[in-house]
C-alpha cells in the first residue's frame, strides 16, 4: 500500500533530467564552496521544494567530476554501437552491463538514464532476425526493468509506437528461437505487472499471436511455457491500482476467442509433472474465466479436469494450490461448475490441501474464496460442504490467521453464503466460536467491518454498533441480489461473490 501511495503522490510531479540535477550540484560546489555531499543534499532539497520527482536521479556520481562511471561509460558505448548497428560492440557492452549493473545500487538507473532502454528497443527493431542479439538485449532489458519503475515506464514510449510493441514484434519475428521467446515473455511479464498501459499495448500490438505460437512451437520447453503462462496471467490481472479503467476484461475475452485456451490445456498435459509450469498456466486460466461462455468452454473442453488433476498431483506445492483454488473460485460463478466442484473430487482435494497448508495465509485465503463461490445460492452444495467438515476448516483458518484482513473477510463471506439459505447450520458455526472470531476480526480490521455485519446478521448474532453504512458502503464486499447483475459487469462481483483480482497483491 505504501508503494501505491508513493506512486500516486509522484503521478502529478514533474521530473528533472540527470544533467539539470548535476548542474545544480556543480553550481553548489563551485559557487558556494559546498562539499559534494552537502551540494547533493541541497540540490535534492531545492528540487523537492519545487515539487519535483527525483526517482530518476543518480546521486552517487553527481559532482564527482573526472571520467564517467564505468556503467555510464559502458551504457554510452552500447548506445553508440546500437546506432551504428555494430553487432560485436553491442554484444561486448551487453556483457559488461550484465556483469556491472547488479553490483551497483544505482546501476539500473544509471544505465536507463544513459539511454540503454531506448537503444535496446531500437536494436530489437533493427536486428529482429538475429536471435542471439535479440535474446541478449531482452535479457539486459529485463535486468534493468526488474524493480525499477523508471526503466519500466520507458517501455511506454513513444506513444506512437511504445517499446513494448517492438518487443511483441520481435517475439512474432522469431517464433522458433526458444531463447528469444523465454527472455521476451519474461520481460513482458515483469514490465506489465502493475502497469495497465503496458498490458494494453502488448495486446494492442498483437501480443496474442506470439503467445499462441510459443505454446505451439515450444510446448516441450518448460521455461518458455511457464513464461507464456505468466504473461497470460499478468495481462489478465487488474493489478494497476493507479488507473480507473482497465482493459483486462477485454483481454481475457480476446484470449479465449483467439482459441488459446486449448493450447493451455495441451501444455498442462505435457507438463503435468512440473508444478511451477502448472502454477502459471492455472493462473492464466483463472485470468480468462471472467464470463459465463468462457467458463462453460473451460468446463467442457477439459480445463477444469486438468486443474483438478494438477491439484491432486501437487497438493503440497503452495503456489499451485493457491492458483488452482482461485481458478475454482472464478469458475464457480457458473452454477454447473459449482455443482461439479462440490459433488465431485474437487471439494475433498481443496479441504485436504487447506489442511496441508494450514499455516499459509495465501493458500487458506484462496481456499476460502473458492468455498464461498461454491456455496453461493447453492444449499445442496452447502449440505455436502458441511458433511465434509468445511465449517471446521474455515474457523480453524480464522483462528490461525487472525492478523490477515483479506483472509478473514473471505472467511466471513464464505460463512455467510453457507448459512443464509441453510439457517439450520448456524449452530454448527456458533458452537465452535464463529461469533467471537468474527467480532475479533471486525474490531481488528476495518476492511472486515461490512462482511462482519452481514455474517453476524445471517448467523443470528448481535450485529449492531457498526454505524448506519455498515455492510452497505460503496466498498462493501457484498451487494444485494438486485444489484448483482449490474455490478457483475462493472466490477466482476455479485451477491456474496468471491471473484477476485487481488491474487498478487501480497505475493
Image (spheres, helix red, strand yellow):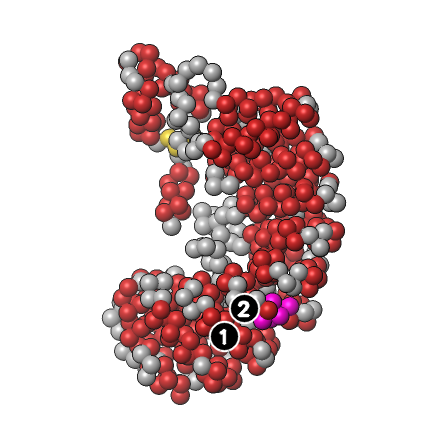
Of residues 411 and 205, which is closer to you in this image?
Answer: 411
Pointer 1: what residue? 352
Residue farthest toward the left in the current orientation of the protein: 465
Residue 369 picture location, percent across and down: 47, 68
What distance separates the C-alpha of mark 1 from that of mark 2? 8 Å
Q: Is residue 356 visible?
A: yes
- Is disc 1 placed on a helix, strand or loop? helix
Please give the count of numbered marks on the rendered protein: 2
- Is disc 2 placed on a helix, strand or loop? loop
Seen in the picture, residue 414 relative to 234 is either above or below; the reply is below
Of residues 492 and 96, which is closer to you in this image?
Answer: 96
Decide if residue 150 is on the left or right side of residue 466.
Answer: right
Q: Residue at x 50, y 23 (%)?
A: 70
Q: Is residue 205 visible?
A: no
Prevailing SS of the magenta stretch = helix
Give the label on residue 419, or none: none
Quarter of the image where one finds residue 220: bottom right
Residue 121 picture location, percent across and down: 62, 33
Residue 432 picture location, percent across and down: 33, 81
Give the label on residue 315, or none: 2
Crowding at mark 1 (Cα within 10 Å: few <14, some 14-19, many 20+): some
Residue farthest toward the bottom in the current orientation of the protein: 424
Question: Which portion, as a residue range, is magenta?
Answer: 306-312
Q: Earlier in the sequence, mark 1 or mark 2?
A: 2
Seen in the picture, residue 168 relative to 375 is either above or below; the reply is above
Q: Do the CB atoms of the residues marked 1 and 2 lie less than 8 Å apart?
A: yes
Seen in the picture, residue 421 relative to 287 is either above or below; the reply is below
Decide if residue 453 is on the left or right side of residue 122.
Answer: left
Residue 451 picture location, percent across and down: 37, 69
Amino acid at each position: 500500500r505504501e508503494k501505491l501511495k508513493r506512486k500516486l503522490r509522484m503521478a502529478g510531479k514533474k521530473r528533472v533530467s540527470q544533467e539539470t540535477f548535476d548542474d545544480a550540484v556543480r553550481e553548489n560546489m563551485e559557487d558556494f564552496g559546498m562539499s559534494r555531499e552537502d551540494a547533493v543534499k541541497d540540490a535534492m532539497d531545492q528540487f523537492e521544494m519545487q515539487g519535483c520527482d527525483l526517482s530518476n536521479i543518480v546521486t552517487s556520481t553527481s559532482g564527482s567530476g573526472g571520467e564517467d562511471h564505468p556503467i555510464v561509460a559502458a551504457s554510452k558505448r552500447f548506445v553508440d554501437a546500437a546506432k551504428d548497428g555494430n553487432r560485436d560492440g553491442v554484444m561486448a557492452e551487453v556483457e559488461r552491463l550484465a556483469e556491472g549493473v547488479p553490483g551497483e545500487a544505482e546501476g539500473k538507473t544509471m544505465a536507463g538514464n544513459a539511454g540503454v532502454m531506448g537503444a535496446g528497443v531500437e536494436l530489437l527493431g533493427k536486428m529482429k532476425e538475429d536471435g542471439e542479439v535479440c535474446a541478449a538485449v531482452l535479457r539486459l532489458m529485463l535486468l534493468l526493468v526488474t524493480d525499477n519503475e523508471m526503466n519500466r515506464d520507458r517501455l511506454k514510449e513513444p506513444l506512437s509506437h511504445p517499446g513494448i510493441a517492438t518487443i511483441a514484434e520481435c517475439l512474432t519475428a522469431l517464433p522458433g528461437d526458444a531463447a528469444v521467446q523465454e527472455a521476451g515473455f519474461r520481460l513482458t511479464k515483469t514490465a506489465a505487472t502493475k502497469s495497465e498501459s503496458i498490458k494494453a499495448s502488448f495486446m494492442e500490438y498483437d501480443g496474442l499471436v506470439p503467445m499462441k505460437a510459443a505454446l505451439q512451437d515450444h510446448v516441450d520447453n518448460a521455461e518458455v511455457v511457464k513464461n507464456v503462462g505468466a504473461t497470460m496471467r499478468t495481462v489478465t490481472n487488474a493489478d494497476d491500482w493507479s488507473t480507473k479503467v482497465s482493459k483486462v476484461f477485454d483481454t481475457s475475452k480476446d484470449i479465449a476467442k483467439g482459441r488459446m485456451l486449448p493450447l493451455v490445456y495441451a501444455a498442462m498435459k505435457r507438463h503435468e509433472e512440473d508444478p511451477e509450469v502448472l502454477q502459471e498456466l492455472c493462473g492464466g486460466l483463472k485470468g480468462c474465466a471472467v464470463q459465463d461462455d468462457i467458463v462453460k468452454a473451460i468446463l467442457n473442453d477439459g480445463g477444469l479436469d486438468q486443474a483438478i488433476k494438477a491439484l491432486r498431483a501437487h497438493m503440497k506445492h503452495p503456489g499451485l494450490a493457491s492458483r488452482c483454488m482461485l481458478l475454482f473460485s472464478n469458475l464457480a460463478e457458473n452454477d454447473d461448475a459449482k455443482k461439479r466442484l462440490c459433488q465431485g473430487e474437487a471439494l475433498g482435494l481443496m479441504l485436504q490441501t487447506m489442511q496441508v497448508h494450514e499455516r499459509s495465509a495465501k493458500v487458506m485465503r484462496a481456499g476460502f474464496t473458492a468455498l464461498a463461490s461454491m456455496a453461493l445460492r447453492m444449499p445442496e452444495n452447502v449440505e455436502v460442504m458441511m458433511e465434509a467438515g468445511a465449517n471446521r476448516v474455515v474457523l480453524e483458518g480464522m483462528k490461525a490467521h487472525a492478523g490477515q484482513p483479506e483472509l478473514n473477510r473471505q472467511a466471513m463471506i464464505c460463512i455467510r453464503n453457507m448459512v443464509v439459505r441453510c439457517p439450520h447450520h448456524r449452530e454448527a458455526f456458533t458452537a465452535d466460536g464463529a461469533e467471537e472470531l468474527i467480532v475479533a476480526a471486525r474490531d481488528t480490521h476495518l476492511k472486515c467491518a461490512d462482511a462482519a455485519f452481514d455474517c453476524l446478521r445471517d448467523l443470528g448474532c448481535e450485529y449492531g454498533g457498526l454505524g448506519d453504512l455498515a455492510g452497505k458502503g460503496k466498498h462493501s464486499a457484498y451487494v444485494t441480489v438486485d444489484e448483482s447483475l449490474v455490478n457483475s459487469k462493472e466490477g466482476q462481483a455479485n451477491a456474496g461473490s468471491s471473484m477476485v483480482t487481488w491474487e498478487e497483491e501480497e505475493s
